[in-house]
Image (spheres, rainbow, N blue to C red):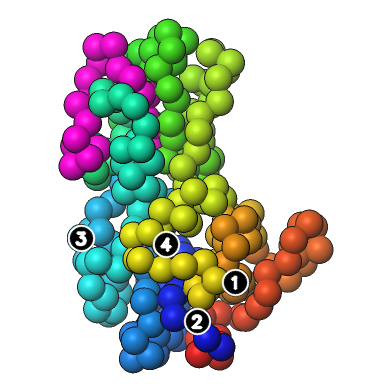
Amino acid sequence: MNKKNLICDIDGVILHNNDLIPGADGFIRRVLEQEMNLLFLTNYPAQTPKDLQNRFYSAGIEVPEHCFYTSAMATADFLKRQSGEKAYVIGEGALIHELYKAGFTITDIDPDFVVVGETRNYNWSMIQMAAKFVAGGARFIATNPDTHGPHMHPACGALCAPIERMTGKKPFYVGKPSAWIVRAALNHMDAHSENTLIVGDNLRTDILAGFQAGLETVLVLTGVSQVADIDKMPFRPQHIYPSVAEIDLF
């Protein structure tokens, strides 16, 4: 297969929480030995590439820091293409850091954007402030549409819900399944869709995003989606494997 680039999800594909999925280390080693252009793409906006590199290292995998791209990074890249330079942000330091790097002012005075990521410090005042700004014309942007994580931890989509209900305005979700984040990831790794594979465990996010962006898709069954789920979807992954350890496409 003439594929030079690989975009790979993390949770459910390489790691379960912080534990290595059996065979994932060998898969990554094989990809790097093939000198493929590798990028790990995650919807989770609250960790920097350095944080993710350390997470992998703790699981016994050494991967360069530049091999990670997050929805926080994609959100900053998206906003750089828009008019406006002030943002009211609900999120953790990793998201704020990316927006600062992109030249944005973080403020609660007349922002151009309301940007929602993920945080455990969500409160009534944040909802009220964000809703007031969105109702007043600030553009509503969210890092990802995920509603919850492990153990039903509220995720970005859940934090957006009350703001959406109060204002009647839906956010633009940057993360998967939006094709935008895949296009941003391709730009980040200087790659093209026609010679890139995307590997994921979730039909509704990873595989749908890859399909919409024109990539060849690989579903692994170590995470969210199982074989029985495929018939429920109007699209099909091109390849299905029990785990990344079984992938034999390169």
Q: Position of residue 10 (x, y in %)?
A: 42, 65
Label 4, secondary structure: give it: helix
Location of residue 131 in the rendering, given as x and y in whole percent from the top left corner: 44, 14
- Residue at the farthest right position: 231
Say which label, 3 or 4, has the lower sequence index. 3
Mark toward the start of the polypeptide (4 vs 1): 4
Mark 3 lies on residue: 50
Q: Which mark is residue 125?
A: none
Locate residue 156: give its quadrant: top left
Q: Secondary structure at mark 1?
A: strand
Q: CA distance from mark 3 to mark 2?
A: 27 Å
| Residue 102 placement, left or right of 159 | left
In the image, which disc is placed on residue 216?
A: 1
- Mark 4–mark 1 Cα distance, whole angstroms, equals 13 Å
In the foreground, 181 or 247:
181
Question: Magenta stretch?
Answer: 99-119
The answer to whether residue 113 is magenta is yes
The mark lying in front, picked from 3 and 2, is 2
Q: Is disc 4 surrounded by few (<14), some (14 to 19) or many (20+) residues within 10 Å?
A: some
Residue 103 to residue 193: above or below: above
Local crowd size for mark 1, using a 10 Å CA cut-off: few (<14), some (14–19), many (≥20): many
**Are the residues flagged by discs 2 and 4 in contact, CB closer than 8 Å?**
no
Inspect the image, locate mark 4, and give the three-letter code of the amino acid beneath it: Leu
Which amino acid, by three-letter code, is at mark 3? Lys
Kindly identify which residue carries mark 2. 3
Pointer 1 with pointer 2, Cβ within 8 A:
yes
